[in-house]
Amino acid sequence: MKGWITSQTADHFRLPLRMQLAEMIPQESKFLEVGCGTGDLFYLLSQKISFGLGLEKSQPLVRFAQQKMRKQEIRNVAIRRARFPETLSYVAKFDVGSASLFFSNLTADKAEDTLKKMGELCSEILIAEFDPLHKMKRAKLIADSVGWFDKENYKAFRRSGGVEALAERCGMQITQRTEGPYKGLFIYTLVQELRVKQKVAERSKRPMYSKV
């Protein structure tokens, strides 16, 4: 019942965001989504990606997503129940990871540990969250967007500086900030600072040729 309710409420709100995210995922990539809910993003991506893994802590949502995948005969996507960050210790490498209105629902410690694990697994991470400086009517907007939310965690996430502060604490760099489909909602592209430094070092080692 929870899966069906989510598909009729929160999924409708998230659809424009999922469509925008789907455009940002590279062709033939291996894709990981944490907090995947009923797995709707994978319906948009199943013919574009080589493989997808959706992780979700709610068993009713996982069952609902798995049933829909079987009905649609989508075979390159797996939806699994997960605990965050623990389950990420058993996950393989991915090209791109994604989380939509997910980190603001975790405690600060779990959010940091989960993002650090994702940074180890994914070459690039897309995070969709509301800008903490944006004023909005929280109750209806958030309830509609996520279906349920932890009010205290959400307020603490905003007070702490949102995605930008979380990325800094986790040693990650934001390379792009894209406006989302709703006012105040942004999609942040993150990479590990270590990877950025390695790329800079590799470029500096390339031989320089001058015209004779």
Image (cartoon, grey):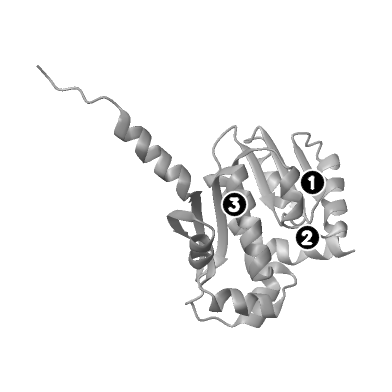
Name the mark on residue 79.
1
Residue plotted at (35% across, 40% down): 200
Q: Residue furthest right?
A: 1
Q: Which amino acid, by three-letter code, is at mark 2?
A: Ser
Which residue is disc 3 drawn over?
19
Q: Which amino acid, by three-letter code, is at mark 3?
A: Met
Nearest to N terminus: mark 1 or mark 3: 3
Q: Are marks 2 and 3 in contact (CB under 8 Å)?
A: no
Nearest to N terminus: mark 2 or mark 1: 2
Element on which disc 2 rests: helix
Q: Is residue 85 left or right of residue 73?
A: left
Residue plotted at (54% across, 58% down): 170
Nearest to N terminus: mark 2 or mark 3: 2
Number of residues whose C-alpha sits closer than 10 Å to that of mark 2, classed few (under 14), some (14–19) or many (20 or more)? many
Q: Give the Cα distance between marks 2 and 1.
A: 16 Å
Element on which disc 1 rests: strand
Which residue is disc 2 drawn over?
7
Q: Give the Cα distance between marks 2 and 3.
A: 16 Å
Residue 111, percent from left and from top: 64, 63
Q: Is residue 10 left or right of residue 63?
A: left
Q: Which amino acid, by three-letter code, is at mark 1?
A: Ile
Q: Nearer the viewer, residue 143 or 197?
A: 197
